[in-house]
Image: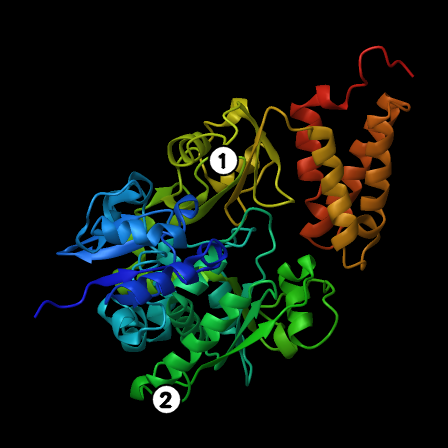
Amino acid sequence: MRSKRVVYVPNETSAVSLGANEVAEAIADKTDAVIVRNGSRGMCWLEPMVEVVVGAERIAYGPVTPEDVDGLIESDFLNGGKHDLLLGPTEEIPYLKNQDRWTFQRCGLINPLDLAAYLEHGGFSGLTHALESGPRGVLEQVKKSGLRGRGGAGFPTGIKWQTVADAKADQKYVTCNADEGDSGTFSDRMLMEGDPLTLIEGMIIAGFAVGASRGYVYLRSEYPLTRDIFEKALKVARAGGWLGDDIQGSGFDFDIDLHLGAGSYVCGEETAMLESLEGKAGVIRYKPPLPAVEGLFGKPTVVNNVITLASVPNIIAMSGDRYAEHGVDRSKGTLAFQLAGNVRRGGLVEKAFGVSLRNLIEDFGGGTASGRPIRAVQVGGPLGAYVPAAQLDILLDYEKFAEIGAMIGHGGIVVFDDTVDMAAQARFAMEFCAIESCGKCTPCRIGAVRGVEVIDRIIANENREANLDLLDELCDTMIDGSLCAMGGMTPFPVRSAVKYFPEDFMPPAGDNK
């Protein structure tokens, strides 16, 4: 008796929005295949991508619509039959094959809620090593790895954890910032939907290293499927004895609560997030004290984002030195870069630092979706600088980006072709800040409003040179005087637009007010 074929259909937001649930139902209704709902492999332009296990390989087809299912069945896709949507062995697709998968190695490979599959593919081996080596051993490996925060600032994770570990307190916390609000970013969501147990494992290891017994995940409310999957993953981990009291008989207690945000962009900043977790308005705190010393409920607190924490299990399982072999200079390891905007093949690409922006956009992304020349690329979300086409060969490296007044941030890459109006983009940056400011500090609250007005006058060619000077002074004030990156980094996209695309701020020919 022949065993039933196993077919993987993603249960991930972008795939579901394109009909993955209907595709899964159609295949289940019309065949006797076993349907496994996995995460996404990150090739968004191929979603829903269906995979069927044939021999030792998984053969991919995509993008599949419900209307394609009959044709796939007729072509004998359950045995890898030829079809217009046939992509071949999944692991041989160049977009995936040429990546450096460390944090996302299981994403799309397994059912994210199958604990046995997670363990079979190396899950919880990092935590097992941690419990054996002790807190000091964990901290040593994280420091050796050179892992830096993947949320924006790039602060060394080991130093942050050591600070919390050294703090004296009766209670400590680990908080995960999953308030993924930057434009063009989706790696947090994709990880939490495709491999949530990795994040849970990373948080437990962090808690063990610093002496914390409680963790909180701050998730943006716009991710309902993520919430559903992660809540189920917490139950799976607890039921398996990997979360809660006396984890695997080790005597270590750690549990995690999931908290939903309310749509505030500024709660992506660590202290505003902590205020929100405490049930207060999401408003920036003054620093010092730092959260590592006095954070959630006044206690020492680790604050990291999803990708930072999810990178830790393999660091502990395979050593910090092995992780540090990836990357360049002080930018160690890998980052899940996200290609979005006007790009032909949008999706997630995990590569070691040191890859060029051009390589990501052209070799992986296939250039612009419009087929027109690239004019600008915004890296690092709405507060990131615009990189002109002439600088596409810059390497993805924290320090190299800082040298040109840019940042890597969360790894979001938004591509624009030569039809973009960069003066309008500069205006949008100030407008975005005005809308999203928490209002605590004047440079951000008032400066952004004035910034919109000044740019409007420049565009209208009213005292153009004087207003350009005023805009420059305003940017200085926002950078130097704002309490957090909301106001302090809004000038980055504004200044880069003025610097690299001055022609967009010029009056139309014949307009000489």
Circle 1 residue: 343
Mark 2 Cα shell of 10 Å, populated few (<14), some (14-19), many (≥20): few
Residue 153 drawn at (x, y percent): 56, 51
501 displayed left or right of 170: right
Q: Which quarter of the image is occupied by the C terminus? A: top right
Residue in front for this viewpoint, 382 or 35: 35
Q: Nearer the viewer, residue 215 or 3?
A: 3
Residue 48's mark? none
Disc 2 residue type? Asp
Q: Position of residue 45 (x, y in %)?
A: 43, 44
Sequence-earlier tag: 2 or 1: 2
Q: Are marks 2 and 1 in contact (CB under 8 Å)?
A: no
Q: Secondary structure at mark 2?
A: loop
Residue 37, quarter of picture = bottom left
Left or right of 153? Residue 233 is: left
Nearer to me, 1 or 233: 1
Q: Is residue 14 visible?
A: yes
Q: Which mark is residue 246?
A: 2
